[in-house]
């Protein structure tokens, strides 16, 4: 796929802890949407970033960690590749992780643009994980971090326990609603049916969500 004169430079950044049994071939398949979008024939061929100073896509086999700091020229259609990548990584992840994606508008020239013109830059936060609970845990932790950092400008950290507790309540409600929705359509227990809850359905409640 050629991306000459692409309207965006797209930067993907994140770190995903993978299961100990995951091998390179599985990672290559999960990341196929990325390296194919870059026009490569394999992960090894497409792992390098458009910028030499960025490490690109790296797999630490000893620590079972996938690290991504990778830029590719592209368009809005890259979002579909991201969705497919997330589905692939969900199957390999040991725990929840966040992946940041930034779209930089390469066609916007601040010096030549009209005063009311704005760049089409965009930022997307994606989440992957083996279960919905693992994904919600990452979302919860990031939100708590953001809220605490903001409020510590005005309050001591020791005063914010109630705020964190309210955030936990919101995520508990979301988790319970998800579990309840996955229970719908299951055959009654004891019927011998092969009821399924979907990938990662139900499972353990995220930590801190009491």
Image (cartoon, rainbow, N blue to C red):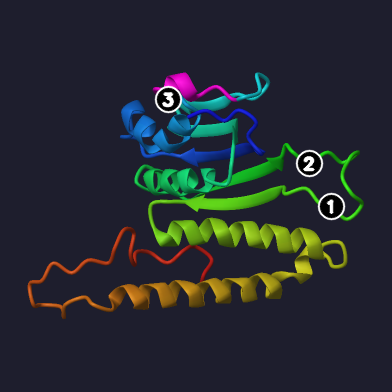
Q: CA gap, disc 2 to disc 1?
A: 9 Å
- Rate crowding at label 1 as few (under 14), some (14 to 19) or many (20 or more) other CA atoms within 10 Å: few
- Rate crowding at label 3 as few (under 14), some (14 to 19) or many (20 or more) other CA atoms within 10 Å: many
Q: According to the image, label 2 marks what residue? A: 108
Q: According to the image, label 3 marks what residue? A: 43
Residue positioned 57% across, 47% down in the render: 76
Tell me the SS state at disc 3: helix
Residue 105, percent across and down?
Answer: 72, 41
Q: According to the image, label 1 marks what residue? A: 117
Q: Compare residues 8 and 148 and report the one nearer the observer.
A: 8
Marks 3, 2: nearer the viewer: 2
- Rate crowding at label 2 as few (under 14), some (14 to 19) or many (20 or more) other CA atoms within 10 Å: some
Discs 2, 1 touching: Cβ within 8 Å: yes
Quadrant assignment, res 12: top right
Q: Earlier in the sequence, mark 3 or mark 2?
A: 3
Residue positioned 62% across, 51% down in the render: 124
Q: CA gap, disc 1 to disc 3?
A: 38 Å
Residue 44 falls within the magenta-colored stretch: yes
Residue positioned 43% across, 31% down in the render: 36
Q: In the rendered structure, which segment of residues is drawn in magenta?
A: 41-49
């Amino acid at each position: 796929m050629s991306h000459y004169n692409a309207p965006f430079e797209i930067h993907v950044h994140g770190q995903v802890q993978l299961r100990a049994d995951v091998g390179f071939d599985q990672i290559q398949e999960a990341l196929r949407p990325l390296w194919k979008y870059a026009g490569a024939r394999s992960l090894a061929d497409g792992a390098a970033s458009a910028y030499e100073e960025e490490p690109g896509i790296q797999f630490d086999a000893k620590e079972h960690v996938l690290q991504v700091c990778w830029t590719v020229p592209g368009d809005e259609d890259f979002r579909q590749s991201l969705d497919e990548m997330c589905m692939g990584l969900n199957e390999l992840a040991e725990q929840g992780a966040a992946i940041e994606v930034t779209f930089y508008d390469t066609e916007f020239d601040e010096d030549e643009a009209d005063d009311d013109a704005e760049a089409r830059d965009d930022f997307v936060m994606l989440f992957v994980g083996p279960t919905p609970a693992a994904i919600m845990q990452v979302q919860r932790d990031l939100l708590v971090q953001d809220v605490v950092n903001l409020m510590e400008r005005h309050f001591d950290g020791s005063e914010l326990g109630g705020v964190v507790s309210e955030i936990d309540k919101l995520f508990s409600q979301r988790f319970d609603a998800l579990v309840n929705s996955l229970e719908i359509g299951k055959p009654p227990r004891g019927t011998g049916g092969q009821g399924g809850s979907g990938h990662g359905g139900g499972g353990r409640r995220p930590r801190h969500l009491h």
